Image (cartoon, rainbow, N blue to C red):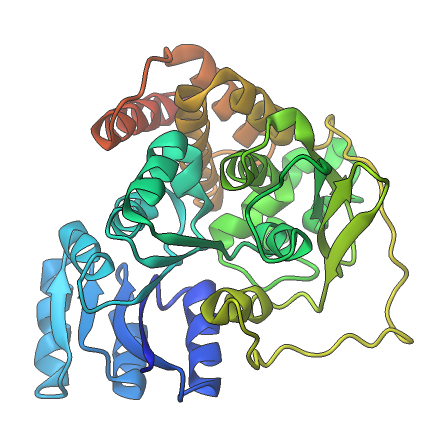
Amino acid sequence: MRARVAVMGATGSIGTSTLDVIARNPERFDVFALTANTNADALEALIRTHRPRYAVLTEASAAAGLSAKLGHCGTEMLSGPEALVEVAAHPDCDAVMAGIVGGAGLESSFAAAAAGKRLLLANKEALVMSGSLFMQAVGRSGATLLPVDSEHNAIFQSLGNSRQTGTGVRRLLLTGSGGPLLRTPLEALARVTPDEACAHPNWDMGRKISVDSATMMNKGLEVIEACWLFGVSVDAVEVVIHPSSMVHSMVEYVDGSVVAQMGSPDMRTPIANALAWPERIESGARALDFAGMTPLEFEPVDLARFPCLRLAMDAARSGQAAAIILNAANEVAVERFLDELIGFTQIEEVIAETLGRVPTRAIGSIGDVLELDGEARHAARGVAAG
């Protein structure tokens, strides 16, 4: 039987790449559901191509309008956050691609984990925000949790297609390109525009994730995610700069061996790996040209250039509440930067001040997560407003 896949965040870069891989392997996969935030036109085009059983838009009015346009095409339109949870946990759904960006993807990702789905996790914020709760849900339900972030998928592959590190692993090495501002003079960073911050040299990503790459907050969030995925401490995870993005991450073993996963910078590779695991399928990614590729250069991270990474590492050591506050403040700060309401270097300032303002506390439920997330976002908006 073909696996029935719900693609959460279908109109984003992860969603469109997932649908491309699925289209290349029609004998293996069916599109069960497609979801989007507000982009009704893009979702309509995907519905007409892939004919899912369900489609979801966040706004009820937009969903009703799209439903009327679709007529009797066989797709049932749903709306609202509760509909995201419904399709992610639906008993007829086999696999869920968690591709919604940011904290908005938490509840549907958690629902898929709790329902025992094959969960392809591209939404790093779900683990950043709910860590132990999320992993407990996976353990209770027997869900199959597969990392899709290129770095975590690379570690997964370097561990022999496993999330078990065992006793022989010395450290996990997350590579980062350094983004578009790696060589920008420090004194010029305050004048960086949103378009400049989003001009990633290697990866085609959404604007929020592109800014996270420019600040290297994405690496900080990935450190936190790696700790939960692979059961290691923050001190067992190291970030290194690798400008060409050919080595996606590495595992160093106690005998001195380092196993790396390489490939063209194309998200279809980790997506295909997670969709087909433990088998391999065609992804459409370009093969590496070893004779013509750029040299494999690595360098340490300059935390004066990337203070957001330091904030994330500190939050990882402080505990779950600090990670929730960090993520919420970052999402608010990046949004304000993209709206040109604050400068690039103020992103770190908003996050640091929010971490100082919002007290941490014990987190025992998803309700606790969402409550603290809301408080942190409110505080961050106040900080950003000056």
The correct choice, above or below, for 318 with respect to 295 in the image is above
41 to the left or right of 263: left
52 to the left or right of 223: left
The correct choice, above or below, for 375 with respect to 331 in the image is above
Which residue is located at x 35 percent, y 38 percent?
Answer: 134
324 to the left or right of 262: left
Q: Quarter of the image holding residue 294? A: bottom right
Q: Quarter of the image holding residue 92? A: bottom left
Q: Viewer-proximal residue, 184 or 27?
A: 27
Total marks shown come to 0
Q: Quarter of the image holding residue 58? A: bottom left
Q: Is residue 276 visible?
A: yes
Q: Position of residue 269 (x, y in %)?
A: 59, 69
Q: Viewer-proximal residue, 223 or 242?
A: 223
Q: Quarter holding the C terminus?
A: top left
Q: Quarter holding the N terminus?
A: bottom left
Q: Viewer-proximal residue, 348 or 226?
A: 226
Q: Position of residue 224 (x, y in %)?
A: 53, 33
Which residue is located at x 18 percent, y 77 percent?
Answer: 53
Q: Position of residue 51 (x, y in %)?
A: 24, 84
Q: Is residue 385 visible?
A: no
Q: Position of residue 139 (x, y in %)?
A: 35, 41
Which residue is located at x 34 percent, y 52 percent?
Answer: 143
219 to the left or right of 185: left
Which residue is located at x 64 percent, y 50 percent?
Answer: 155
The correct choice, above or below, for 122 with respect to 323 in the image is below
